[in-house]
């Protein structure tokens, strides 16, 4: 059984999907258009709660039938999009990106992709644009809501003496408070995980309960307009820096509630449209709303694929054309896939096709992961497609853990990913490489260097943690405490009797005032312990994922630039003071960019196309070896450091 049809809800669906699509296309300044997903959640909560309560009160609710209807509504178009994206990815994407896609797609057909993106979208991961089905995280959240909420409402109606409304308010309040708290400590959890989004669905569900009603049609029209303002204003005012969701999700959720509530009769949920509802619910907008699910599914893969195969960022015109193409595909999907397969039909045929499709998707995900993205598709690009060209950090076995030998006061605070290159032995020089993920990225270059010097190297690193004593990250991460890690690193260097230390980081990522004093303190502490030091200056930052750029250019047939502009060398003056202070503290300065860059243009690959960068700023294993070979003369710290440059 379905609720009475309301054109204004289809119109609200259109607003939601257009906000999301225009946000992804970077059009019309909708920097907060991502909140369109929250509007979808409110609408889903309203409709699903109404269906479950209506059927349950009549004694006609069947969980298996409910799940089947939801699957018929959601699965056919989703599987169609997924299979098309699988084919396109196999034809167009580099092995690294295909393997990542295979990993992400494996949880999609069982509606678990939100867990994948929660665990994998981070500082060290690829750009979100790499995941052509990233937007499907919201479908996973929605389906998880369907199952949980159906079970909850059935249990409440059957066994609870408390009214349904009390349960809904309690669940919504608990979820909202949790989201408002967790968004500050683990923002990805608040964004991707269902418990912290549940209140948005339940907010819509509350509208199905009998409650007060504004009798005046003009009053309800004003509330509808207010609701649209609460939706649209944040869509323009919010941006990527907004702490979202949590409290900031409250205005658009309330706006959606007001618009839905003001357009219904309080008891039977039938439409009672005001002028505002009728104006929005015109035939064009309503049709977009009816196609909104398919449009939501198709818009992101089309945009992402267009950007992937382009030699430059998409222009507004190109983005607009991509969205138009996505909508045309969506209209076909609506009429040829969504509507026909939503209708009741042979259950065995439907579930047989569903099972076969899921098996095919899972097999694809497993196969491309096992084959590292099937590099054999492009035998002419073997050097580029080799793992050393698109991965960073020492290869397995080259850098071994030493934590078993550490005392508790060091081991419990030091990042466990720190490791040792070479075998420790009496009389061997002991050298430390200390820093953030850029220290880990350069580690492969030290493998050869350690052998040549017959030295043992300790790579002491933690993500987003520069080698600056007392530095604390200004935002929460899943990594170890930065201050404790650096204090433990200094203790370890003293314990190991390190004689030389190389410090490096993605200095551009940290405001100079926040790291300058900590870096100088670290250098002074090392000098007091008899350690000779050098600081690697900022390496190149190119603004593109270099292996993907080379691959796209070669496969796509457009001219590849062997040199790309560094995005931040021109702004290096902001960090010059940092390097000068390091030199005053007795450290050599090593220009990490110098083997690659001249006149702000940086060589991105070797002559055989092997990429020097694993992404836009971490050196690949190939690039790390190239850099250390080129800089080895500057890295000889046996003599006194050069005098610091004059102020």
Image (cartoon, rainbow, N blue to C red):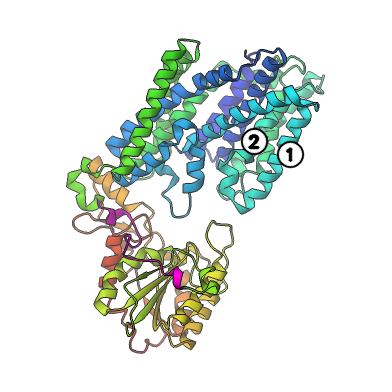
Q: Main secondary structure of the magenta part?
A: loop
Residue at the image position 68 percent from the left and 45 percent from the top: 178
Is residue 310 at all visible to an observer of this figure? no
Q: Which mark is residue 173?
A: 1
Q: Position of residue 496 (x, y in %)?
A: 43, 80
Q: Position of residue 232 (x, y in %)?
A: 63, 35
Name the element at disc 1: helix
Seen in the picture, residue 535 relative to 155 is either above or below; the reply is below
* Residue identifier under label 2: 198
Counting residues from the start of the chain, the first of labels 2 and 1 encountered is 1
Indicate left or right for 507 with 602 as reference.
Answer: right
Indicate left or right for 498 with 174 as reference.
Answer: left
Residue at the image position 63 percent from the left and 23 percent from the top: 48
Marks 2 & 1, CB-CB < 8 Å contact: no
| Span colored in magenta | 386-405
Seen in the picture, residue 406 relative to 28 is either above or below; the reply is below
Q: Position of residue 517 (x, y in %)?
A: 55, 77
Quarter holding residue 142:
top right
């Amino acid at each position: 059984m379905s609720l009475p049809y309301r054109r204004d809800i289809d119109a609200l669906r259109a607003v939601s999907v257009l906000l999301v699509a225009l946000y992804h296309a970077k059009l019309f300044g909708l920097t907060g258009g991502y909140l369109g997903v929250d509007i979808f959640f409110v609408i889903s909560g309203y409709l699903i709660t109404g269906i479950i309560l209506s059927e349950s009160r009549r004694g006609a609710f069947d969980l298996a039938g409910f799940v089947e209807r939801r699957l018929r509504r959601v699965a056919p178009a989703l599987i169609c999009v997924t299979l098309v994206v699988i084919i396109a990815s196999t034809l167009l994407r580099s092995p690294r990106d295909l393997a990542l896609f295979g990993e992400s797609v494996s949880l999609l057909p069982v509606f678990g992709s939100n867990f994948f993106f929660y665990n994998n979208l981070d500082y060290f991961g690829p750009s979100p644009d790499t995941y052509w089905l990233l937007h499907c995280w919201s479908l996973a959240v929605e389906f998880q809501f369907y199952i949980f909420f159906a079970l909850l409402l059935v249990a409440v109606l059957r066994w609870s003496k408390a009214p349904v409304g009390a349960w809904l308010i309690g669940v919504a309040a608990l979820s909202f408070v949790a989201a408002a708290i967790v968004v500050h400590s683990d923002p990805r959890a608040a964004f991707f995980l269902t418990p912290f989004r549940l209140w948005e669905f339940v907010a819509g569900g509350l509208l199905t309960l009998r409650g007060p009603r504004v009798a005046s049609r003009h009053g309800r029209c004003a509330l509808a307009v207010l609701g649209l303002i609460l939706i649209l204003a944040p869509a323009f005012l919010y941006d990527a820096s907004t702490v979202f969701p949590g409290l900031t999700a409250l205005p658009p959720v309330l706006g959606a509630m007001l618009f839905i509530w003001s357009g219904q009769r309080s008891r039977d949920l039938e439409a009672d449209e005001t002028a505002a509802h009728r104006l929005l619910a015109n035939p064009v907008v309503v049709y977009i709303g009816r196609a909104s699910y398919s449009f939501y599914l198709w818009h992101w893969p089309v945009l992402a694929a267009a950007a992937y195969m382009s030699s430059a960022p998409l222009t507004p015109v190109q983005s607009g054309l991509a969205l138009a193409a996505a909508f045309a595909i969506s209209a076909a999907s609506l009429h040829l896939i969504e509507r026909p397969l939503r209708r009741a039909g042979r259950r065995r045929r439907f579930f047989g096709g569903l099972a076969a499709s899921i098996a095919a998707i899972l097999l694809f995900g497993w196969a491309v992961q096992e084959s590292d993205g099937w590099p054999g598709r492009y035998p002419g690009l073997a050097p580029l497609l080799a793992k050393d060209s698109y991965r960073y950090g020492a290869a397995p076995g080259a850098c071994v853990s030493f934590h078993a030998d550490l005392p508790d006061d060091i081991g419990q605070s030091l990042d466990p990913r720190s490791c040792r290159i070479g075998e420790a032995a009496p009389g061997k020089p002991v050298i430390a490489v200390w820093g953030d993920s850029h220290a880990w990225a350069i580690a492969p270059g030290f493998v050869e260097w350690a052998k040549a010097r017959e030295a043992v190297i300790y790579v002491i690193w933690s993500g987003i943690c520069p080698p600056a004593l007392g530095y604390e990250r200004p935002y929460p991460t899943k990594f170890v405490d930065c201050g404790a890690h650096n204090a433990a690193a200094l203790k370890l260097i003293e314990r190991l009797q390190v004689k030389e230390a190389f410090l490096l980081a993605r200095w551009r990522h940290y405001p100079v005032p926040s790291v300058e004093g900590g870096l100088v303190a670290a250098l002074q502490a090392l000098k007091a312990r008899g350690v000779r030091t050098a600081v690697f200056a900022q390496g190149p930052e190119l603004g593109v994922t270099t292996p993907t750029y080379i691959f796209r250019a070669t496969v796509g047939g457009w001219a590849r630039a062997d040199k790309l502009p560094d995005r931040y060398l021109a702004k290096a003056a902001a960090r010059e003071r940092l390097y000068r202070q390091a030199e005053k503290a007795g450290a050599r300065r090593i220009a990490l960019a110098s083997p690659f860059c001249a006149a702000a243009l940086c060589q991105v690959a070797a002559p055989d196309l092997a990429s020097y960068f694993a992404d836009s700023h971490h050196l690949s294993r190939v690039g790390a070896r190239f850099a250390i070979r080129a800089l080895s003369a500057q890295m000889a710290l046996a003599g006194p450091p050069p005098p610091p440059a004059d102020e």
